[in-house]
């Protein structure tokens, strides 16, 4: 058995991925569970001015440094620490600093396209797709992006029509077929969360047995 178990949590923007992931961390306790957001692995676009960065497509596989993400997941599974990049949504760019992250038993990898790359999927022990209707996802995104990500209504509408919606149809929704578990009703689906918590606890018991 490996040192760690990897759980991928995917779904469209605003579907409730972060809410599910944070709920799992709360219920299991952060001693054993590490949350890695795919957002940290958006490519560094410091060479472009802010106005140009704001126009980029952030909803396609090319927007991410997947090679680095795969390398980091492999390192964590091998029991090694990583220097994780950080991301600032308000300026559409990586932060200059990295943070040292130590491995834990359970690695939760959450993001819109974590189920897209076959090599990344193969590292996962459980694959989850969080589902919510498109009007609900859009509404949540509008509220969150105006409150937390410094966006205007006009910029949200433009980005949604230009990239968010078409890329969801082209790249994100098709990855639902890879999921072991589909979580409907977004982030506060307590039954689905309880099932995942029970499975994670049984993984932790198996990993402890291996340790003796
Ligand atoms: N089932 C739900 N019911 C109501 N609000 C929800 C639900 N799931 C998530 N939210 C809210 O919607 C917003 C977006 O959820 P989040 O988990 O950040 O989505 P994602 O990570 O998929 O973009 C957050 O403000 C969150 O509290
Ligand atoms: O610089 C950026 C990077 C990403 N985005 C948008 O964020 C969402 C993904 O985050 P969620 O937390 O899953 O919603 C993605 O749809 C991108 O469009 C951005 O606007 N700017």
Image (cartoon, rainbow, N blue to C red):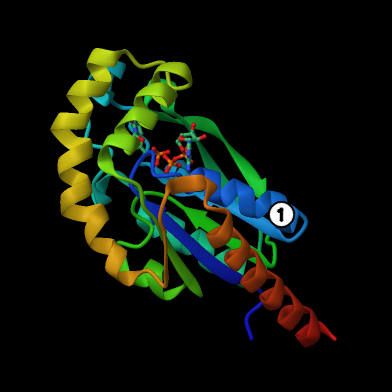
Residue 12: percent from left, percent from top = 33, 46
Residue at left offset 27%, top offset 35%: 135
Q: State the image coordinates of residue 210 (x, y, percent, origin top left).
A: 76, 86
Query: For residue 115, what is the image quadrant?
Result: bottom left
Quadrant location, the C terminus? bottom right
Q: Is the residue 52 above or below the residue 22 in the image?
A: above
How many labels, in total? 1
Rendered image quadrant of residue 42? top left
Observer-nearest residue: 102 or 170?
170
Q: Is residue 137 above or below residue 81?
A: above
Residue 82 shows in this picture = no
Please state the horizontal and vertical placement of residue 118, each as a whole percent of the image: 32, 71
Indicate the secondary structure of the residue bearing disc 1: helix
Residue under label 1? 27
Ligand 1 within 8 Å of disc 1? The answer is: no
Q: Establish if 26 lies above or below 196.
A: above
Q: Label 1: how many residues lie within 10 Å, few (<14), some (14-19) or many (20+)?
A: few
Quadrant occupied by the N terminus:
bottom right
Task: Name the residue at 54% across, 44% down.
Answer: 19
The one nearer the camera, 84 or 161, is: 161
**Image side of residue 17 versus residue 212, left or right:** left
Q: Residue at x 50, y 30 (%)?
A: 95
Whether residue 9 sits left or right of residue 47 in the image: it is right
Please tell me which residue lies in front, 164 or 100: 164
Quarter residue 104 falls in: bottom right
Can residue 9 be seen from the camera position used here? yes
Q: Residue at x 66, y 70 (%)?
A: 198
């Amino acid at each position: 058995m490996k040192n760690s178990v990897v759980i991928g949590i995917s779904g469209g923007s605003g579907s409730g991925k972060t809410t599910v992931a944070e709920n799992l961390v709360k219920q299991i306790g952060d001693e054993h569970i590490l949350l890695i957001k795919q957002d940290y692995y958006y490519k560094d676009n410091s060479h472009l001015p802010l106005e140009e960065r704001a126009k980029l497509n952030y909803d396609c596989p090319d927007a991410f440094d997947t090679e680095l993400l795969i390398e980091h997941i492999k390192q964590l599974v091998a029991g090694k620490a990583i220097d994780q990049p950080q991301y600032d949504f308000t300026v559409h760019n990586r932060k200059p600093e990295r943070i040292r992250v130590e491995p834990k038993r359970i690695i939760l990898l959450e993001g819109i396209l974590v189920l897209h790359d076959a090599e990344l999927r193969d590292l996962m022990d459980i694959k989850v797709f969080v589902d919510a209707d498109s009007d609900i996802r859009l509404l949540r995104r509008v509220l969150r992006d105006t409150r937390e990500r410094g966006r205007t209504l006009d910029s949200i509408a433009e980005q949604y029509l230009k990239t968010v919606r078409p890329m969801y149809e082209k790249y994100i929704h098709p990855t639902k077929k890879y999921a072991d578990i589909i979580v409907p009703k977004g982030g506060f689906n307590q039954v689905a969360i309880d099932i995942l918590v029970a499975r994670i606890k049984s993984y932790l018991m198996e990993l402890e047995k291996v340790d003796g």
